[in-house]
Amino acid sequence: MSEDHAHEHRGFVPTRRLEAFADGIFAIAATLLILDVVASRTPLAPELLRVWPSYAAYAFTFLSIGIAWINHGTLISLVDRCDRTFLVLNLLLLTTVAFIPFPTRLLAAHLFDEDAQAAVLAYGVTLLVTSIFFNLLWFYGVLRRGLLSADADEHLVRGISRSYTPGPYLFLAAVVVAFLSPLVSAALLAAIVLFYLLEATIFARS
């Protein structure tokens, strides 16, 4: 009996289909972002300058999705099988990833008007929930359920745990700040994205 069939027989399933589905969701979510960058007025030159919030929202959100894709791929590489709990948690994570283009559009459209607080809250809460599901997938779906590959690098495992742990707290803090100042909250969310951009490249070597 092959290893994959043995895992399925014991209630586990291999990760290859999960990887393909997840990569598709990340790719679609990232691609949808650019559809919201629109210059619809004339003259065109000042309009291109006026819609700069759309550029900024696109750039930072694309980075967010890209970082999530990198981290998800690293996580999956350490797992050689998955059970139903892992699959459900992964599905919930991908649900939030697929939703990200919607609050991104709201943020770009309303950052500087009377609806700024609602837009920033929608964006921040979405990233907060995404971070929570990443933690659930890792700490419960992988570590608690014992799904790590036997040859997983312990240093990398510790690095991932150290990287994921502060995420929900950082995003929660930015969400709370939105009740005081939406612009400061948006700046904090951008700073968190930049932090994780750096963290995603160095946590395994720290």
Image: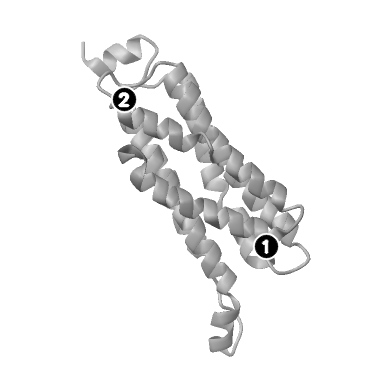
Q: For the residues marked 1 and 2, what is the alpha-carbon distance in whole angstroms?
A: 40 Å
Q: Residue beneath label 2, please?
A: 154
Which residue is located at x 64 percent, y 42 percent?
A: 172
Q: Badge 2 local density, few (<14 within 10 Å), some, or many (20+)?
A: few
Which color scheme does this rendered protein use? one colour
Can residue 12 be seen in the rendering of this structure? Answer: yes
Indicate the quadrant containing the N terminus: top left, top right, bottom left or bottom right.
top left
Residue 95: image x %, image y %? Answer: 54, 39
Asked if residue 12 lies left or right of residue 47, the reply is left
Q: From the viewer's perspective, is residue 48 above or below residue 184?
A: below
Asked whether 186 or 95 is in front, the reply is 186
Q: From the viewer's perspective, is residue 131 above or below residue 1?
A: below
The quarter of the displayed image where residue 206 is located: top left
Which residue is located at x 40 percent, y 51 percent?
A: 198
Give the residue at the far bottom of this rendering: 43
Q: Residue beneath label 1, please?
A: 183
Q: From the viewer's perspective, is residue 123 above or below residue 81?
A: below
Residue 72: image x %, image y %? Answer: 40, 38
Q: Which amino acid type corresponds to the residue marked 1 in the rendered image? A: Leu
Which residue is located at x 36 percent, y 28 percent?
A: 157
Asked if residue 169 lies left or right of residue 154, the reply is right
Q: Badge 1 local density, few (<14 within 10 Å), some, or many (20+)?
A: some
